[in-house]
Image (tube, grey):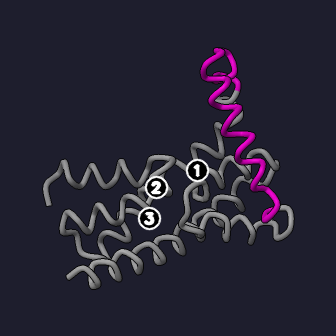
């Protein structure tokens, strides 16, 4: 695997919409072993979470200074708050399940935003978000390998 392919996988896994749902299939496409793909994508998906948990308040203040970024940030906040019921019901375990569901709009970035909006403890949130990433990674790698077996 080339360095730029490795960096592609890390970047895709770190981004808010694709996360490891995009990174794992990309890594397998590039020929990375399933175990290596899992660990690289899980770690890459987890990298931005501590920064998000620590700095989302400051990021929100900065984004709200400009009309365009304020609208975009507000859109994501409103969309995220619509999904707070699972966390209201199950607390930190709900945060884990929310992040673990490998669907669009449920992942580590949205889980971090929910944690911030609900005023949850940052350390506990990180641990539960990371647990959700681990579970989501297993689900995505299983589905990806299943598809690869099916198409071969």
Tell me the quarter of the image containing the C terminus. bottom left
Q: What are the residue bounds of the magenta stretch? A: 61-87
> Is there a contact, CB below 8 Å, between mark 1 and mark 2?
yes
User: Considering depth in this image, is 109 or 50 the residue closer to the camera?
Assistant: 109
Residue 100 place in picture, x, y as percent: 59, 69
Q: Which mark is residue 42?
A: 3
Assign a secondary structure to mark 1: helix
For the residues labelled 3 and 1, the Cα–Cα distance comes to 13 Å
Q: Is residue 135 left or right of residue 120?
A: left
Tell me the quarter of the image containing the N terminus. bottom left
Q: From the viewer's perspective, is the residue at label 3 or at label 2 nearer?
A: 2
Circle 3 packing at 10 Å, graded few (<14), some (14-19), many (20+), is: many
Q: Is residue 80 magenta?
A: yes
Name the residue rendered at 55%, 63% in the picture.
Answer: 103
Q: Is residue 41 left or right of residue 60?
A: left
Q: Is residue 66 left or right of residue 90?
A: left
Circle 2 packing at 10 Å, graded few (<14), some (14-19), many (20+), is: many
Q: Which residue is mark 2?
A: 19
Answer with the quarter of the image where residue 69 lies: top right
Q: Which residue is mark 1?
A: 109
> Is there a contact, CB below 8 Å, between mark 3 and mark 2?
no
108 is higher (above) or lower (below) than 91: above
- How many marks are shown on the rendered structure? 3
Q: Earlier in the sequence, mark 1 or mark 2?
A: 2
For the residues labelled 1 and 2, the Cα–Cα distance comes to 8 Å
Name the residue rendered at 86%, 68% in the picture.
Answer: 89
Name the residue rendered at 55%, 57% in the picture.
Answer: 104
> Is there a contact, CB below 8 Å, between mark 3 and mark 1?
no
């Amino acid at each position: 695997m080339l360095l730029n392919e490795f960096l592609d996988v890390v970047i895709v896994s770190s981004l808010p919409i694709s996360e490891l749902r995009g990174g794992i299939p990309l890594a397998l496409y590039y020929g990375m072993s399933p175990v290596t793909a899992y660990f690289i994508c899980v770690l890459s998906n987890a990298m931005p979470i501590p920064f998000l948990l620590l700095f989302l308040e400051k990021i929100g203040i900065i984004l709200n200074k400009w009309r365009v970024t304020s609208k975009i940030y507000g859109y994501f906040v409103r969309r995220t708050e619509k999904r707070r019921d699972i966390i209201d019901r199950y607390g930190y375990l709900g945060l884990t399940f929310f992040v673990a569901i490998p669907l669009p709009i449920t992942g580590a970035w949205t889980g971090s935003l929910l944690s911030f909006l609900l005023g949850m403890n940052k350390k506990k949130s990180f641990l539960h978000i990371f647990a959700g990433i681990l579970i989501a990674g297993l689900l995505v790698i299983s589905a990806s390998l299943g598809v690869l077996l099916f198409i071969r």
